[in-house]
């Protein structure tokens, strides 16, 4: 099967060509941004984010190790993004999360969010990790460089909050966008990259209710005035 290649448009110049696997790896390492423009061999332009989404729809993600074009082997971890963060808030709940200190690594995998890092244990340091199935991440909230997550488990329906500072707004937005089952926390802004069609559809209903209430109040006032005249 032909492996398509793309040129990266940078300051008016075309760099490359690179295949999709190389471009995705450059995005993970933050050498490319999601909004960077690519040009295919057929002249069609698209962004890095669009290319990544096309690949996810076709093969479910990309493997961080192995030969180019190699299909994911059984049990191999498929990674969609890697970020550096610090844990700001950690509430107790269904998941046991180590008391991480300093920077942690956040990996968005096909079915889980993996957080790994170091923490104090006795007089030394220990490394550990925790995985949250994406299905268990019920809500997310994005503000600046911080992503708040609310996680639940079947055994513990109460939501467990975890706040991560990703240090860069772009990284925070990408992480929030990559959580397919997380709804915006009630009262918060729509998550980055999410369609706002559902949000905009609510607005006419709200205006209808407001206008309807105003008409009722006006009708009552007219009735009162005509009765007292």
Image (tube, helix red, strand yellow):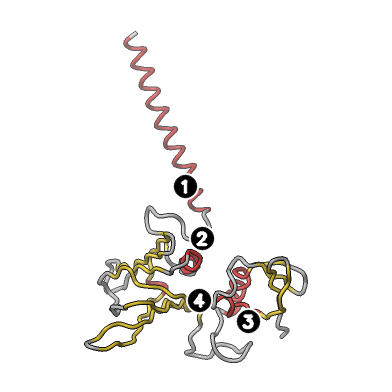
For disc 1, the neighbor class at 10 Å (few under 14, some 14 to 19, many from 20) is few
The Cα–Cα distance between marks 2 and 4, rounded to whole angstroms, is 17 Å
Residue 113 x, y percent position in the rendering: 42, 76
* Residue drawn at point x = 42 percent, y = 37 percent: 209
Q: Give the number of the disc on residue 81.
A: 4
Secondary structure at badge 4 equals strand
The Cα–Cα distance between marks 3 and 4, rounded to whole angstroms, is 14 Å
As drawn, is 210 to the left or to the right of 24? left
Camera-side residue of 39 and 78: 39
Residue 52 x, y percent position in the rendering: 59, 73
Question: Which-is-in-front pick, marks 1 and 4?
Answer: 4
Residue pushed farthest top?
Answer: 229
As drawn, is 43 to the left or to the right of 55? right
Earlier residue among tags 3 and 1: 3
* Residue drawn at point x = 70 percent, y = 69 percent: 9
Q: Give the number of the disc on residue 22.
A: 3
* Residue drawn at point x = 42 percent, y = 27 percent: 215
Q: Give the number of the disc on residue 202.
A: 1
Residue pushed farthest left?
Answer: 122
Earlier residue among tags 1 and 4: 4
* Residue drawn at point x = 27 percent, y = 66 percent: 158
Earlier residue among tags 2 and 1: 2
Question: Which-is-in-front pick, marks 3 and 1?
Answer: 3
Q: Which residue is mark 2?
A: 194
């Amino acid at each position: 099967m032909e492996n398509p290649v793309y040129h990266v448009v940078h300051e008016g110049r075309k760099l490359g060509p690179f295949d999709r696997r190389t471009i995705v790896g450059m995005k993970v390492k933050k050498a490319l941004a999601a909004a960077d423009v690519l040009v295919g061999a057929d002249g069609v332009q698209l962004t890095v984010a669009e290319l990544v989404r096309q690949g996810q729809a076709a093969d479910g993600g990309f493997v961080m190790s192995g030969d180019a074009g190699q299909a994911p082997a059984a049990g191999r971890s498929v990674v969609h993004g890697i970020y550096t963060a610090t844990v700001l808030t950690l509430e107790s709940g269904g998941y046991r999360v180590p008391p991480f200190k300093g920077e942690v690594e956040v990996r968005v995998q096909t079915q889980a969010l993996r957080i790994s890092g170091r923490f104090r244990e006795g007089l030394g340091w220990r490394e550990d990790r925790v995985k949250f199935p994406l299905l268990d991440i019920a809500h997310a909230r994005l503000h600046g460089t911080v992503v708040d997550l609310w996680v639940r488990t079947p055994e513990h329906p109460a939501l467990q909050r975890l706040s991560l500072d990703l240090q860069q707004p772009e990284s925070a937005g990408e992480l929030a966008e990559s959580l397919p089952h997380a709804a915006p926390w009630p009262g918060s802004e729509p998550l980055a990259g999410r369609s706002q069609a559902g949000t905009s559809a609510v607005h006419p209903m709200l205006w209808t209710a407001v206008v309807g209430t105003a008409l009722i109040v006006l009708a009552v006032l007219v009735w009162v005035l005509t009765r007292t005249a």
